[in-house]
Amino acid sequence: QVQLVESGGGSVQAGGSLRLSCTASGYIFNRCVAWFRQAPGKEREGVAVIYDGGRSTYYADSVKGRFAISRDNAENTLFLQMNSLRPEDTAMYYCAAGASVFSRCRSPDDSLIWGQGTQVTVSS
């Protein structure tokens, strides 16, 4: 099974930027790929998705216009560029790939392969 490894998390002040990376041990872009996040005491939520063979993206309303999901097919790497960060963006961020081409990557209950997570902390 493909393994996913995230990097790029850290601490930043409000208004700052971070770029998360997720490197896969194999090819994953024949299926949906996504970023989720989970804040303490809250449920895991979807942040951004690339699907439909890379032709379409989806963003949660809370990050639209601030975050951008992208991928490097040659490097089997998924990115999340996060700009204008807010304290409410503080969470553990996870990358995920569909376990099959039929996965949708819209819900944490979907059939997904998960990375171990990377912490993002935004201070005011």
Image (spheres, rainbow, N blue to C red):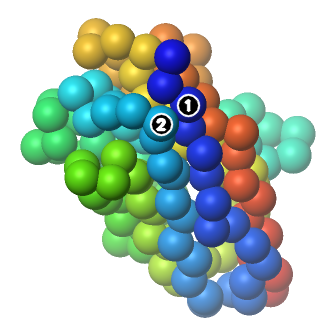
Query: Viewer-proximal residue, 103 or 89?
Result: 103
Residue located beneath label 1 in the image: 3
Query: Viewer-proximal residue, 35 or 3?
Result: 3
How packed is label 1: few (under 14 Cα within 10 Å), some, or many (20 or more)?
A: some
Q: Position of residue 4 (x, y in %)?
A: 55, 38
Q: CA distance from mark 1 to mark 2?
A: 5 Å
Left or right, residue 100 beside residue 22: left
Which residue: 45% across, 61% down? 80
Q: Which mark is residue 41?
A: none
Q: Are marks 1 and 2 in contact (CB under 8 Å)?
A: yes
Q: Position of residue 78 (x, y in %)?
A: 40, 52
Q: Amino acid at mark 2?
A: Ser
In which image quadrant can residue 119 be found?
bottom right
How packed is label 2: few (under 14 Cα within 10 Å), some, or many (20 or more)?
A: some
- The correct choice, above or below, for 109 with respect to 58 in the image is above
Element type where label 2 sits in the image: loop
Left or right, residue 24 beside residue 43: left
- The correct choice, above or below, for 32 with respect to 62 in the image is above
Which residue: 24% across, 49% down? 73
Q: Amino acid at mark 1?
A: Gln
Which residue: 42% across, 59% down? 79
In which image quadrant can residue 29 be found?
top left
- Label located before the other in sequence (1 or 2): 1
| Residue sitting at the far right | 41
- The correct choice, above or below, for 31 with respect to 82 in the image is above
Q: Position of residue 34 (x, y in %)?
A: 43, 40
| Residue sitting at the far left | 55
Q: Which mark is residue 25?
A: 2
Which residue: 15% across, 34% down? 53
